[in-house]
Image: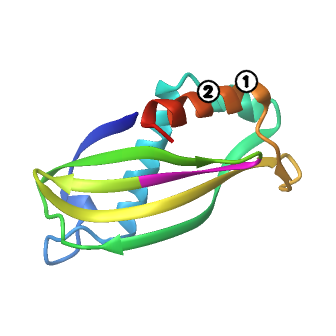
Amino acid sequence: MTHSLQIRVYYEDTDLAGIVYYANYLRFIERARSEMVRAAGIDQTALKSAGLVFAVRRVEADYLSPARFDDVIEVRTTLTALKGASFTMAQEIWRDDTLLFRADVTLVILTETGRPGRLPADIRARVASLAAEAGH
């Protein structure tokens, strides 16, 4: 399954040249990951109440072409790997048929103490279903 989220680029997302500021791409992909997790039926508020949170461990990003003020962009997110305590997502930002940005993002689960934990069985099953739908 590839999850898709459309986002309009607002003035606040850009620099003086009207080009999306590089750090905002990370905000866009964060939003898309949150929506994908929500679509998988994972309640991050309930997870936090149980003393667990998702955290980004690693991002490898390529900026390929600029997005500009008032563009409508699409963030595509696909789960590519699932391990006992982490999972990886490939994320791309497109404007029509032009790839603007791509990143591989590894997420881990942290406990209340800030230490790594294992994915709870129910969460792992929901994440695994995303991987199965994506053919991984």
Q: Residue at x 14, y 70 (%)?
A: 18
- Mark 1 sits on what residue? 122
Q: Are marks 2 and 1 in contact (CB under 8 Å)?
A: yes
Q: Which residues are magenta?
A: 85-90
Q: Secondary structure at mark 1?
A: helix
128 inside magenta stretch: no
Q: Number of marks in the image?
A: 2
Distance Cα–Cα, label 2 vs label 1: 6 Å
- Tell me if 125 is positioned left or right of 29 in this view: right
- Tell me if 94 is positioned left or right of 124 in this view: left
The spot of residue 116 in percent (x, y) is 82, 54
Q: Nearer the viewer, residue 122 or 22?
A: 122
Q: Secondary structure at mark 2?
A: helix
16 shown above or below 29: below
- Tell me if 115 is positioned left or right of 23 in this view: right
Q: Quadrant of the N terminus?
A: top left
Q: The residue under label 1 is which amino acid type?
A: Asp
